[in-house]
Amino acid sequence: MTAEAKTSGESGHARFTYRLRASSTARAVLEAEWDRCRWLWNECVAKSRQVGAWNKTRPEGAEKRTCGPVQLAAMLTEARARTEWLREGACVPQQQLIRAFGRSRAKALKDIRARLPMRQRAGMPKYKKKRDALPTLEYTRRGFRLEDGRLHLAGGIVATVVWSRELPELPSSVRLCRDSIGHHALPLSERTYTCTACGVVSPRDKNSARVMLVRAGLQPGWC
């Protein structure tokens, strides 16, 4: 699992990626947060398609419907009010997901209006399947804090950060992500990898080669 910190300075924006060490309890909570956000994303996709279908077949004189950030934010408020499972999660990553969906949809509509070739279009947001979509959560400043070298997230989630470099200032946002085979990405300053399953320490480049073989469908005989 990695954390991507975004800072805003005089020279512009900068992104820093760090490795995270999270306990099994924290991992379970993060997985639950991702399940809620994935469900919410799929609800946004359904809403977007519903609005699109209505606008194509709406009766003459009927008002055109929209599915912008305001409508999606209202949908989130309503969903949290009626769904206890959704309320159990932090509202910050859910709100950030709504914004990300809005940006993705707006970009797709912009490409359509510009009549770009299909291969150059971003495409409308699609449903996310649990087995295919990689867990990603984003928190703004009101949803996280850094204290004693650890990352504290909304909902009582705490993870240890492997500091490969110092941050020039407090980040404006933090994004957590995990790769497709559950491995933790390493910053370039770390040249070794410790397997979380068996504890074997191997060179970073050797472990990268193993990851490539696994993704190609092969099973190397070394860790």
Image (spheres, grey):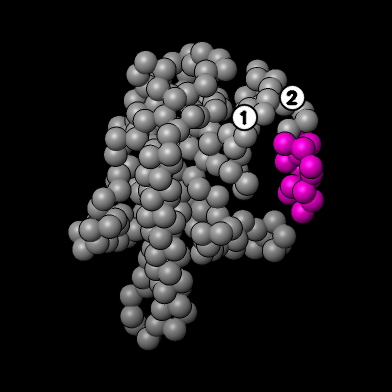
The type of residue carrying mark 2 is: Pro
**Quarter of the figure that contains the C terminus:** top right
Pick the residue in front: 131 or 107: 131
Is residue 123 visible in the rendered image? The answer is: yes
Which span is picked out in magenta? 208-223
Q: Which residue is drawn at the image coordinates 77% and 37% (left, top)?
A: 222
Q: Horizontal and vertical percent for residue 217? A: 77, 54
Which residue reaches farthest left?
81
- SS label for mark 1: loop
Give whichever of 179, 99 is nearer the camera: 179
131 relative to 211, above or below: below
Q: Which mark is residue 203?
A: 2
Can residue 216 be seen in this snapshot? no
Give the residue at x 68% y 25%. Answer: 201
Q: CA distance from mark 2 to mark 1?
A: 13 Å
- Relative horizontal placement of residue 157, taking residue 131 as reference (left or right): left
Q: Give the labeled residue for mark 1.
A: 199
Q: Nearer the viewer, mark 2 or mark 1?
A: 1
The kind of secondary structure element at disc 2 is strand
Give how far across and how far down residue 120 sits, in percent: 70, 56
Is 80 colored magenta in this rendering? no
Residue 210 is covered by the magenta coloring? yes
Q: Residue at x 58, y 43 (%)?
A: 182
Q: Would residue 5 appear left or right of 197 to someone viewing this image?
A: left
Residue at the farthest front position: 198
Give amino acid for label 1: Gly
Residue at the extreme bottom: 59
